[in-house]
């Protein structure tokens, strides 16, 4: 399973990349706005930092404008993926951009049938949001299981990118289900490497090392 970092903070991305945690990056207008810089400049810097796919989101809701924005974003670097919201106009844009050989990521997906239509449109990635479903008392991870099953049934090529991850159980379940990718905030990535028994073992080793003969 690939790990993408969900961030537009270049220093955060560098830290995660140094630790081998970054197979790709996802961004959105909210994350980019926090940097105080233009979307194009942020994406350009991220693409220099990582070799994997970098999702850059359009802000229009009309297909012609989405395509225009997508073509401009794709010029930034070869590893840019154009991120498009789930809607009819968005799927039109996906079809047109895919015909130009441009990779796409359809975001804000909340049902298995939406995911099926995304795959039929030819998207490279689909981004179902599990945490937001959990927030309204639905089981977000059951959505991932359904999407994976549908895609396997029909040998669809769109990759499942599990988004809106809240905690490490989401990641564990995604891995057990065989999801292609998870996109994770840096702080959640940090939680994956820790365990109280690991900390206890290290402390004991250090204590014992002090008693070793010089």
Image (cartoon, grey):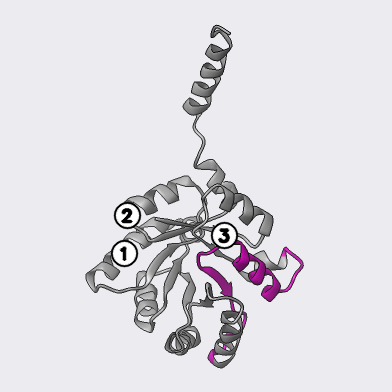
Q: Earlier in the sequence, mark 3 or mark 2?
A: 3
Note whether 46 is above or below 134 in the view shown: below
Q: Mark 1 points at which residue?
A: 148
Q: What element carries label 1?
A: helix
Q: How crowded is mark 2: few (under 14 residues within 10 Å), some or many (20 or more)?
A: some
Circle 2/circle 1 CB separation < 8 Å? yes
Q: Is residue 61 highlighted in magenta?
A: yes
Q: How far apart are the alpha carbons under marks 3 and 2? A: 21 Å
Q: Which of 25 and 120 is in front in this view?
A: 25
Which numbered disc covers residue 177?
2
What stretch of residues is rendered in magenta? 34-63
Q: What element carries label 3?
A: strand
Residue 84 location (% of width, % of height): 52, 78
Q: Residue at x 49, y 61 (%)?
A: 163
Left or right, 142 with reference to 108? left
Q: Which of 15 and 166 is in front in this view?
A: 15
Give how far across and how far down residue 49 sits, in percent. 61, 62
**Horizontal and vertical percent for residue 93?**
49, 87
The residue to which callout 3 is attached is 6
Tell me the tag on residue 46. none
Residue drawn at (65%, 71%) of the image: 44
Picture quadrant of residue 111: bottom left
> Foreground: 87 or 160?
160
Kindly report the distance in space between the C-alpha atoms of the residues bearing marks 2 and 1. Answer: 8 Å
The N terminus: image quadrant: bottom left
Q: Which of marks 1 and 3 is nearer the N terminus?
A: 3
Give residue 36's position: percent from left, percent from top.
Answer: 77, 67
Residue that appears at 43% across and 71% down: 125
Residues at badges 1 and 3 in contact (C-beta under 8 Å)?
A: no
Q: Is residue 139 visible?
A: no
> Label 1 to label 3, Cα distance in Å?
22 Å
């Amino acid at each position: 399973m690939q790990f993408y970092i969900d961030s537009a903070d270049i220093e955060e991305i560098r830290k995660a990349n140094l630790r081998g945690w970054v197979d790709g990056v996802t961004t959105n207008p909210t994350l980019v706005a926090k940097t105080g810089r233009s979307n194009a400049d942020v994406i350009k810097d991220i693409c220099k930092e990582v070799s994997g796919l970098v999702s850059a989101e359009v802000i229009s809701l009309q297909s012609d404008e989405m395509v225009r924005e997508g073509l401009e974003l794709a010029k930034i670097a070869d590893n840019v993926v154009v991120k498009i919201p789930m809607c009819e106009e968005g799927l039109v844009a996906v079809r047109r951009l895919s015909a130009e050989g441009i990779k796409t990521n359809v975001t804000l997906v909340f049902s298995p049938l939406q995911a099926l239509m995304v795959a039929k449109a030819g998207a490279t990635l689909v981004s179902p949001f599990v945490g937001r479903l959990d927030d309204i008392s639905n089981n977000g991870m059951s959505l991932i299981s359904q999407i994976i099953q549908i895609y396997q049934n029909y040998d669809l090529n769109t990759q499942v990118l599990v988004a809106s991850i809240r905690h490490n159980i989401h990641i564990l379940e995604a891995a057990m289900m065989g999801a292609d990718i998870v996109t994770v905030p840096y702080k959640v990535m940090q939680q994956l490497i820790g365990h109280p028994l690991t900390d206890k073992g290290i402390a004991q080793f250090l204590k014992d090392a002090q008693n070793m003969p010089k």
